[in-house]
Image (cartoon, helix red, strand yellow):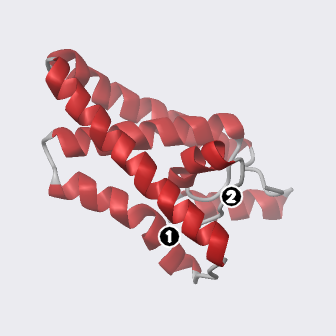
Amino acid sequence: MKDKARIIGRILRLLLGIFFITEVWPVYVAVDWQGAIERIVWALSLVIFYHIIHIVLMRFSFNFNNIVGAFLAFGPLLAVFFVGYGGPAATGALTFLSASLTLAAIRGDSGCEVMTIPAILSRKHTHLPCLLFSPIDWCERKIH
């Protein structure tokens, strides 16, 4: 990937990732092993789902409008969060998001953070825009 996130985008991703970690950590401490495993399974299911999206995008090279691409990237995560709000699915979604944000900040991935884990697994980055971070990445590129 030629376009890396610049310092402001990386810092904001890291801070938001840490914030979500502080939100999910107390849940994992409060539940039993079965509850923790159930939440981790939801997070791993999202990893698998996004890896499948990654493979399809890499194989067929779809060219999306930025808004459509952003909703494709973030929509499934939001759906899992809101459908399972208050339960294991929502915590699993936030676990996946917090790991993705933190890894995106460390790696300097631009675009949507939910594609960072599939990028790590396949060693190829699929750039899907992000409603929150892509505008920040674009502004930082214009400035430098």
Q: Quadrant of residue 86?
A: top left
| Residue at x 73%, y 41% (from the top left corner) | 7
Q: Amino acid at mark 1?
A: Ala
Q: Quadrant of the N terminus?
A: bottom right
The kind of secondary structure element at disc 1 is: helix
Q: Amino acid at mark 2?
A: Asp
Report if residue 130 is visible in the image. no
Q: Which residue is mark 1?
A: 70
Residue at mark 2 to residue at mark 1: CA–CA distance: 14 Å
Q: Earlier in the sequence, mark 2 or mark 1?
A: 1
The kind of secondary structure element at disc 2 is: helix
| Residue at x 50%, y 70% (from the top left corner) | 70
| Left-right relation of 98 to 133 | left
Total labels drawn:
2
Q: Quadrant of the C terminus?
A: bottom right
Report if residue 10 is visible in the image. yes
Percent coordinates x, y for residue 101 in the rendering = 52, 41
Q: Quadrant of residue 128?
A: bottom right
Q: Residues within 10 Å of mark 1 (few under 14, many from 20)?
A: many
| Residue at x 16%, y 51% (from the top left corner) | 84
Mark toward the viewer: 2 or 1: 1
Q: Is residue 114 above or below residue 22?
A: below
| Residue at x 21%, y 45% (from the top left corner) | 89
Q: Are marks 2 and 1 in contact (CB under 8 Å)?
A: no
Mark number, residue 137: 2
